[in-house]
Image: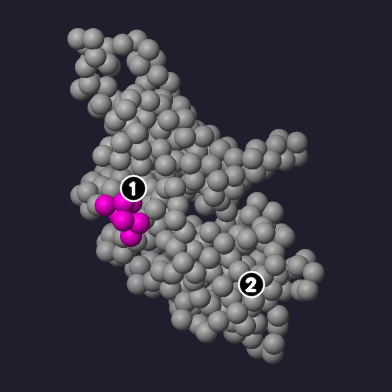
Amino acid sequence: MNFLLTEDQELFRRTVREFAAREIAPVAAEHDEAETYPAENVRKMGELGLMGLTVPTEYGGAGAGAIEYALAMEEVARACAAHSVVLTVNVSLVCEPIYKFGTDEQRERFLPRLTRADIVGSYCLSEPRSGSDARNMETRAERDGDHYILNGTKNWITNGGVAGLYLVYAATDPHGGRIGAFLIEADRPGLRAGAKERKLGIRASSTTQVFLEDCRVPVENRLGEEGDGFKIAMTTLDGGRIGIAAQALGIAQAAFDAAVAYAKEREAFGHRIADFQGLQWMMADMATRIDCARLLTYRAAQLKDRGLPFSKEAAMAKLYASETAMWVTTKAVQIHGGYGYSREYDVQRYFRDAKITEIYEGTSEIQRMVIARHILRD
């Protein structure tokens, strides 16, 4: 497979990189420290076309492919991982399933507003007692004529409290065997977001619980058929894992760049620390792992663009890239020595941000299960 980017893709990457360096990087530490949602930059990402990157142009999107999506995620995450998680949830977890499984009316009603970032989307799957075990769902959607009545609690919801549209998954029978997916506007009575979680990393993204209390949702807001929810959720996560792999890749690249720059400047025993073989070997391993993660991520994206099966490859990319991000950021802190432990240096933020990539949209353990199932199925 050929992973050389086309001229248009190189131009796109350069455009996003320049935007991220100009608009995102200068405010990233400030938003992280204050734990504030970057609303102004989210709007700017919408103006640039990033918030609807893979949505067809007829619905206001950019009509780009998975490769462009991965490139955008990497470059935005390289400047600030929190900005990139707002982007990936809107593009891959909300816009894509609406386009793929929604009716024409749902597409026309929601996609143009999401792609412009007039509103942002939120994906509500996890619950207090179910994370990796997504089928163990306690949120219920009871049919009442031409409405559903939803009750339950969703946990760890990215864009909670700032989203204009929530894609909520709920069991549609008393035993939880059938799951439905529902598009719920933020101002619909019965839906409310809880307090912001105080997180280790990606602190500029808004993460909350979402409570559903006798929330009446019209049948026309159901995404797909009544029992399609689990299929929609799992299919959506396959594509989302490419985004998280690219996010992890961007975090790792930022940490590596910072470590190399510091090693060239810092002196010890009369030499640059970059001249010491021990650190050179460390940086060689960092660069090699990052390149491996990039190739795995681009392969998964290319398979998706070609309409070929990519579930196993997306899981491999997400697994390897996230663990690479954690490993690289740990080494980057070590190269910085005591300064790496100081909040005055960005490398500690990269370290804190990296950990979540091993957890959300499927933990590393879940990725290994997915990969193993595909291996044993072949």
CB contact under 8 Å: marks 2 and 1: no
Residue 195 on image: x %, y %: 46, 67
For image coordinates 40% across by 57% down, the residue present is 205
Assess whether residue 201 is covered by the magenta stretch. Answer: no
Percent from the top left, x then y, of residue 25? 26, 47
Residue that numbered label 1 is attached to: 80
Q: Is residue 172 left or right of residue 279?
A: right
Mark 1 residue crowding within 10 angstroms, few (<14) / some (14–19) / many (20+) = many
Q: Is residue 155 left or right of 47 when viewed as pictured?
A: right
Within 10 Å of disc 2 (Cα), the crowding (few <14, some 14-19, many 20+) is some
Q: Nearer the viewer, residue 41 or 192?
A: 192
Q: Residue at the location (44% across, 56% down)?
A: 198
Q: Quadrant of residue 319?
A: top right
Q: Position of residue 285 (x, y in %)?
A: 43, 21
Q: Principal SS element in the magenta part?
A: helix
Please tell me whether residue 334 is drawn above or below residue 175 in the rendered image.
above
Q: Is residue 179 visible?
A: no
Kindly identify the amino acid type of the residue bearing the numbered disc 2: Gly
